[in-house]
Amino acid sequence: MGRILNCPRCQKDGILQSLPQSIREHLAACIFVAPFKCPSCSHRFLASRLWLDHPTHPMDRREHLRIPVRLYLSFSGGKVRGEGTVLDLSMGGCIIKSETLVHTDDIFYLQLTLNEGDLPLEVAAMVRSVSPRGIAFKFLRAAQEDKRLLAFVQAQTPDQSGKSSRKVDAAA
């Protein structure tokens, strides 16, 4: 039986392995140390990945927890303007349904209506893929650090404490 990793900051489990972002993190991989990120408090840290009870399926190793939602969204970039419905939302991006024609690697400014009566959340995003399921957007770095987005995602997320580290997340 493997061990379950807890966040050193908030002590919750459900920790997600992240992709290395620095030379230090890439070198650490040589000695079986990997970067991890807590979906509850967003704390990022290095830890040994030996004997971890950790998912091996690619869908289970996403960096961000995916939240199913139904939110109105409008977007614009270049000469293209559109609107649609957000189906999945995470700190890393979203998947939307829209009739607007877009292409992979296009960059758009998205306006998401998180709550009725509030100003829309504005984020920059790049189209990762277009499929029958919808348009997958990856938020650019500034959006991933947005406090309103983080508060909304955390409010929609069930409490992580007491649950297995096998939680899936959403990296769009």
Image (tube, grey):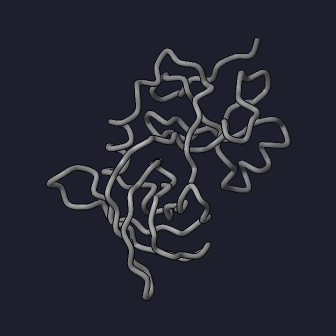
Q: Residue furthest left?
A: 117
Q: Nearer the viewer, residue 1 or 11?
A: 1
What residue is shown at x 25% (from left), y 61% (from top)? Answer: 120
Q: Nearer the viewer, residue 109 or 85?
A: 85
Query: From what the image shows, is residue 151 above or below residue 48?
Result: below
Give the position of the C terminus as an image quadrant.
Answer: bottom right
Query: From what the image shows, is residue 26 above or below residue 73?
Result: above
Q: Is residue 146 shown left or right of residue 65?
A: left
What residue is shown at x 43% (from left), y 36% (from top)? Answer: 41
x%, y% of residue 97? Answer: 46, 59
Query: From what the image shows, is residue 160 above or below residue 128?
Result: above
What residue is shown at x 41% (from left), y 54% (from top)? Answer: 86
Q: Residue furthest right?
A: 30
x%, y% of residue 117? Answer: 14, 54
Give the position of the N terminus as an image quadrant.
Answer: top right
What residue is shown at x 36% (from left), y 36% (from top)? Answer: 156
x%, y% of residue 45? Answer: 60, 38
Q: Is residue 45 shown left or right of residue 140?
A: right
Q: Is residue 125 shown left or right of residue 70?
A: right
x%, y% of residue 34? Answer: 72, 39
Q: Nearer the viewer, residue 12 or 82?
A: 82
